[in-house]
Amino acid sequence: PKRYEKDHSDLIIQGKKISFGIDSFEDYKMWYEDYFIQLADKLYQKKLFDYIYLICGADKSYLADNIIKNSKKNYFINCSKKDLGGIIFALKNSNFFVGNNSGPLNLAAALKIPSLGLIANDPVDELKFSKINIITPENYDNIRCRERNGMKKLSVERVFAKILEHIK
């Protein structure tokens, strides 16, 4: 096994896996948990995954807990207690990554995992040299907004449609 695979046997599971990056150091950059649940439902109906790794830091583990509890689905895998090796393992075993503008999004892109970034409160030119596929609300004004409710402008339907475009 590769060095980063040790102690992560709980992440080894048969089937198609994707990852959701559900937190950020800056709360205003976080898409809402119920939106991730709705997105998962749509992706599951299209048979695009069997399991979803929920990537977040231990300090935001309540986000993963809320998604798992409120969704009433057993396809989520909480990675909030994983170290960097565990996060890398989950990402490398994912067909694609969808998440907030934070470290895991950039890490997934650096690992050459097809990565889709949810951006509604940041200028997108910050990511212009990255391999991230950026998903913004329609008619996005490309300015920094430090209020989380700006993320509500990025609809589940738009994110779902953009994912389908990018992962053909």
Image (tube, grey):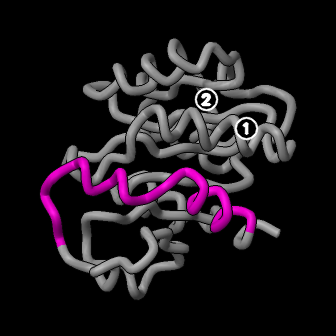
Q: Residue at x 65, y 38 (%)?
A: 40
Look at the numbered disc 1 and give the secondary structure of its residue: loop
Picture quarter with the N terminus? top right
In the rendered image, the vertical position of residue 145 relative to residue 102, given as above or below: below
Residue stretch rendered in magenta on the structure: 144-164
Q: Residue at x 32, y 47 (%)?
A: 30
In the rendered image, the vertical position of residue 26 relative to residue 126, given as above or below: above
Residue 3 visible here: no
Left or right: residue 25 compared with residue 85: left
Left or right: residue 92 compared with residue 69: right
In terms of depth relative to the viewer, which is nearer, 58 or 48? 48
Look at the numbered disc 2 and give the secondary structure of its residue: loop
In terms of depth relative to the viewer, which is nearer, 6 or 123? 123
Q: Residue at x 50, y 28 (%)?
A: 79
Which amino acid is tagged 1?
Pro
Q: Is residue 157 magenta?
A: yes
Left or right: residue 147 compared with residue 53: left
In the rendered image, the vertical position of residue 81 relative to residue 54, given as above or below: above
Counting from the top left corner in percent of width and height, residue 149 is at: 25, 48
Q: Residue at x 15, y 52 (%)?
A: 147
First in sequence: mark 2 or mark 1? 1
The residue wearing badge 1 is: 1
CB within 8 Å, label 2 to label 1: yes
The residue wearing badge 2 is: 6
Which amino acid is tagged 2?
Lys
Q: Tally the numbered discs.
A: 2
In terms of depth relative to the viewer, which is nearer, 57 or 41? 41
Label at residue 30: none
Residue 140 visible here: yes
Q: Is residue 13 magenta?
A: no
